[in-house]
Image: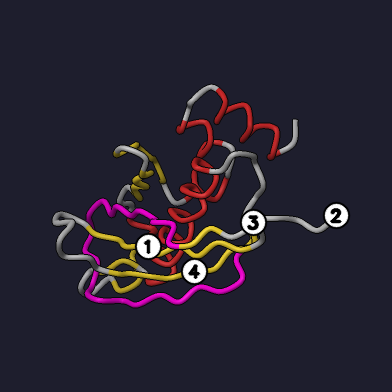
Amino acid sequence: MTLTERLATAKAAGNLADVLGAIPYAQFLGFSASLDGDSVITTMRFAPHLIGNPHLPALHGGTLGALLESAAIFQLIWSAETIVLPKTITITVDYLRSGGPHDTHARGVITRRGRRVTNVSMEAWQADRAAPIASAHAIFLVKRDG
């Protein structure tokens, strides 16, 4: 079964956990997801291998960037009418404060959905959703040629 078929089956069954389970990188980073209305909230469970600066300790910026990008992709897959794997065209991440050794949550909000590209804004937080530790904006290709 292809990745697209696995995603389509999981989405048809309404099983968000299986959507994430189809992506090995999501498992490596310890992602889980839940629904908050129509929004997918992606959580990166803390693990020692996510630390970038052991002296603070602080999460590695690459893991935060991966969380933000993945949150946008999971939102696009979950809210799309058909399964097309989004391809990142560009992403800009703003690191607002250090992320401590805690679970980190993120969500993507689709700000513009076109026929070929979609814009998504993302935010990541830890204990307090009103105090984000990082935010991002990305543009994704959502329709294949041919």
Quadrant housing residue 108: bottom left
- Which color mode does the image show? secondary structure
Q: CA distance from mark 1 to mark 2?
A: 30 Å
Which residue is denoted by mark 1 in the rendering? 122
Which residue is denoted by mark 2 in the rendering? 146
Q: CA distance from mark 4 to mark 3?
A: 12 Å
Which residue is denoted by mark 4 in the rendering? 138
Dot label at residue 142: 3
Q: Is residue 116 left or right of residue 78?
A: right
Look at the image and give the residue range highlighted in magenta.
Answer: 88-111
Residue 102 within the magenta-colored segment of the rendering: yes
The three-letter code of the residue at mark 1 reads Met
Asked whether disc 1 touches disc 2, contact meaning CB atoms under 8 Å apart, the reply is no
Extreme residue in the right direction: 146
Question: Is disc 4 surrounded by few (<14), some (14 to 19) or many (20+) residues within 10 Å?
Answer: many
Q: CA distance from mark 2 to mark 3?
A: 13 Å
The three-letter code of the residue at mark 3 reads Val
N-term mark: 1 or 3: 1
Residue 130 within the magenta-colored segment of the rendering: no
As helix, strand or loop, the secondary structure at mark 3 comes to loop
Residue found at x 34% / y 37%:
35
Dot label at residue 88: none
The three-letter code of the residue at mark 4 reads Ala
N-term mark: 1 or 4: 1
Residue found at x 70% / y 55%:
143
| Viewer-nearest residue: 95 or 62 | 95
| Viewer-nearest residue: 13 or 103 | 13
Question: Is disc 3 surrounded by few (<14), some (14 to 19) or many (20+) residues within 10 Å?
Answer: many
| Viewer-nearest residue: 112 or 23 | 112
